[in-house]
Amino acid sequence: MAPQTTTDLPQIKSRIGAILRATSGNFLEQFDFFLFGFYASAIAKAFFPSTNETASLLNTFGVFWLGALMRPVGAIVLGAYIDRIGRRRGLIVTLAIMAIGTVVIAFCPSYATIGIAAPIIVLLGRLLQGFSAGVELGGVSVYLAEISTSGNRGFYTSFQSSSQQVAIFVAAIVGFVLSELMPADVVSAWGWRIPFFIGCLIIPFIFLLRRTLEETPAFLAMKKHPTASEVFASAVANWRIVVLGMMMAVLTTTTFYFVTVYTPTFGKTVLKLSTQDALLVTLLVAVTNFIWNPVGGAVSDRLGRKPVLLTIACLALVTAYPALNWLIAAPTFGKMLAVEMMFSFYFGVYSGTMLGALVEVVPAHVRTTCFSLAFALAAALFGTFTPFVSTWLIDKTGDKASPGYWLMCAASLGIIAALVIYRGGKTIAVQNAVTA
């Protein structure tokens, strides 16, 4: 036993290092995304001033969503590049584009300083971030799947999502400390930029980590790497798998953006809780998200993807609205924490399962493109649209629990996708599964 343990230890360390290097870019993306959502009110005042606070906030979330519309474009263009040129080189390119978008937003002057140019520059920064994010998550997921050990693919790919939770945790801590050290009006005026500057400072370190990535054995073993035109043609030919993959990923993206990006705004503007309370809930959610993701991946490795996906989606369908309705009836920190913990459980277990499932159903030779496109569509059409839809629903219906309907819609799509993909006990694309 001892010799075996000694032999395996370097391999374990090597795989842990590969996971950390691959997921480092996810940290930057989600760090910035969370900050954009948390400081939405301050960003709205800085770049989208309006006499109507709701209109200003909707403009901000609208820009947040427009950036997400670039995800499918990035998934196709950069996905084809990664499938053709390699996982390692592709992930370095996506990080560079993401870094540029982050710097642009952090240093953009306010509307009061440069006028209409300010919101245009912020929009361009978001478009760059969305273009990069379109393939970042897919590229990392595919990389982790291709370095995974037999029978542990779900567990390995789950760390793509877990790494994002580290970013949310760090961003929440930075925001909490900032709110303790600075008056609210100062934070709203210019203090909100400090966390974005911190994000800029960690970019060089993330580049150093990702430059040391090694190419995956699965990619190196391919006898022929498809050209860009072949990748595009294959993606079109497999449109049904892409659409079903998108439907399967919707519950992941909507619950994620609800419990992270939108929760601080929901807590402050809708429930009228303090900034510190909203941040503390988000911080704790990030911790539980980090835990539940690998749990979901590991459980699905043992029980199968279908039962886990269906169980969580059904639970979300029947509890989303009642839980929010219970919360808004008499908002307290404890009740908000309880509801967010429930959604965190749904998100983590479902996401940890879904990532492995999506890698398995897309064709191997265009794995990055098809995975990224499915996930990007889910994020663009549903996930990143969540803060905007939630704000709009509450404003139009007057029902503060109405975002629950949006989550129920996502759960319904997840149920349909799982039933179709795994009908008859086999996936519709079992021949495309990753070789175990």
Image (cartoon, rainbow, N blue to C red):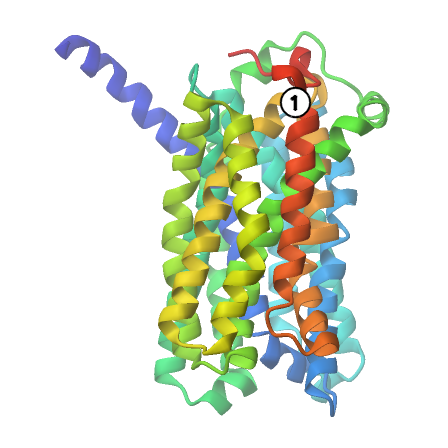
Q: Mark 1 = which residue? A: 361
Residue 311 picture location, percent across and down: 51, 37
Whether 430 is drawn above or below 57: the answer is above
Whether 103 is drawn above or below 148: the answer is below
Residue 182 visible in the snapshot = yes
Q: Residue at x 60, y 79 (%)?
A: 41
Q: Residue at x 50, y 43 (%)?
A: 161
Residue 219 picture location, percent across and down: 60, 17
Element carrying mark 1: helix
Residue 29 visible in the snapshot = no
Q: Nearer the viewer, residue 55 or 413?
A: 413
Residue 54 picture location, percent across and down: 70, 82
Residue 332 picture location, percent across and down: 40, 76
The 10 Å Cα crowd at callout 1, few under 14, some 14 to 19, many 20 or more, is: many
Q: Residue furthest left?
A: 2
Question: In the picture, residue 85 is in which quadrant?
Answer: top right
Whether 18 is drawn above or below 394: the answer is above
Q: Nearer the viewer, residue 219 or 71?
A: 71
Whether 96 is drawn above or below 272: the answer is above
Question: In the picture, residue 275 is in which quadrant?
Answer: bottom left
On screen, residue 270 versus residue 429, left or right, reads: left
- Total marks in image: 1
Q: Residue at x 55, y 34 (%)?
A: 309
Residue type pointed to by label 1: Val
On screen, residue 301 versus residue 123, left or right, reads: left
Placement of the N terminus among the 4 image quadrants = top left
